[in-house]
Amino acid sequence: MEELLELYNTMGISPGVYNYGEETLKKLQSRFADIDRIAEHNQAKVIAAMQKNHVSAACFAATTGYGYDDVGRDNLEKVYADVFHTEAALVRPQITCGTHALTVALSANLLPGDELLSPVGLPYDTLQEVIGIRESPCSLKEYGVSYRQVDLLSDGTFDFDGICKAINEKTKLVTIQRSKGYATRPSFSVKQIGELIAFVKSIKSDIICMVDNCYGEFVETIEPSDVGADMVVGSLIKNPGGGLAPIGGYICGTNACIQRCAYRLSAPGLGQEVGANLGLMPALYQGFFLAPTVVAGAEKGAIFAANLYEPLGFKCVPNATESRHDIIQAVELGSEEGMIAFCKGIQAAAPVDSFATPLPWDMPGYNDKVIMAAGAFVQGSSIELSADGPIRPPYAVYFQGGLTWYHAKLGILMSLQKMVDAGLVTL
Ligand SMILES: *Cc1c(COP(=O)(O)O)cnc(C)c1O
């Protein structure tokens, strides 16, 4: 280990920080072993789906133009459907991001006069304009789709009474966000999501249950589609892209829902038949193949960070010992200086743009200044190690990702080093 310490030392990590990290890691062996077992399960699930669908070199060929009979694209969708245990899937570069995938899923399956219900409180920021919670041209609200919301109870659990009262003859689709995103509520386990779906369907059996699965894929051995979700939706520049997908989103679900999604994404009548793959198939297949281990590495990083920072007096959400349902870790640093130091460390440990210095900045759509650290191969990719947060109490940074556990570890050690260097922490 001496040699590694020396190498880390040349990169700016002091023996004190390194040794504190090693002490912390000793306590995490059994949790890491659990994560490895989940990753092994999910790896086998992905390989089995690729074998069943005869993935071959022919699937990696680029297509252009309309993309009729695109074997690679059609087969990738079968692979996704098999991994998520759904009848069908829509997975392609024409879905530009997670928000786009969610927009397609919602607007394809809600018609004027229908009502959308969120039984888990306010949805992720970008969806608020999609729904019309914040006014926007082309929102669902503008098209005559109404919206109702039931907040979580103060302990973060579902308000079953409130949900029961909110469901009415117009309720067509229920949207359930698995990850807390940038809110302070807990993230939900797949089991909890299953209970919520069963409850909703017991009140009105034909409600479509959609799960925003962003940041949750492969954290457990089952997905929301295994517990009754009609659609699961996410981004390929998060977990399932494995860091290699340069763009894309997915929707997996029932034939009925996915066909409508395909008609909405391209055009009625065209559906899944058009959409050239533009040479991206190798990245989308290989990224999905790597995703289970990438997610495992990111999750280890999140747990390492919580266990490194919590004993030093910083509140962590989830805390050091809680079970995990996504890859996001919030650390409350208590001051602007703390957020800057933390983000500087994440940036300095990156393989790309390590020489840049993150600073708080005014961003469109935010009331407070925001700081962001990211040195990513794919712009904005948050499955790569990244940290950000609004400069306001409790001065929390949200960090996530890491394509490898070792990079996540280095970034977190470097963040602590910058805190120590700034005199904000004494070990
Ligand atoms: C990231 C995220 C989205 C939106 O995904 P983008 O790819 O950034 O558009 C939606 N919901 C949740 C919970 C997310 O974390």
Image (cartoon, grey):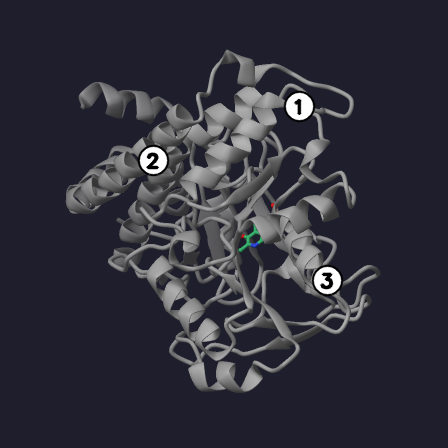
Of the residues shown, which amino acid type is indicated by label 2? Lys
Label 3 near ligand 1 (CB < 8 Å): no
Mark identifier at residue 69: 1
- Kind of element beneath mark 1: loop
Instruction: Report the mark closest to the observer, 2 or 1.
Output: 1
Q: Nearer the viewer, residue 355 or 201?
A: 201
Numbered label attached to residue 156: none
- Amino acid at circle 3: Glu
In the image, is the residue at mark 1 within 8 Å of ligand 1 by its beta carbon? no
Q: Which residue is drawn at 43% across and 56% down?
A: 330
Quarter occupied by the N terminus: top left
Q: Where is mark 2, residue-wise?
A: 45
CA distance for labels 2 and 3 = 36 Å
User: Mark 3 — residue?
Assistant: 129
Q: Distance between the residues labelled 3 and 1?
A: 36 Å
Secondary structure of the residue carrying tag 2 is helix
234 with respect to 50 (left or right): right
| Image position, residue 164 (x, y; %) | 49, 84
Residue positioned 57% across, 48% down in the render: 255
Lower sequence index among marks 3 and 1: 1
Question: Within 10 angstroms of label 2, few (less than 14), some, or many (20 or more) residues?
Answer: some
Residue 237, given in percent of the width and then of the height, sits at: 56, 37
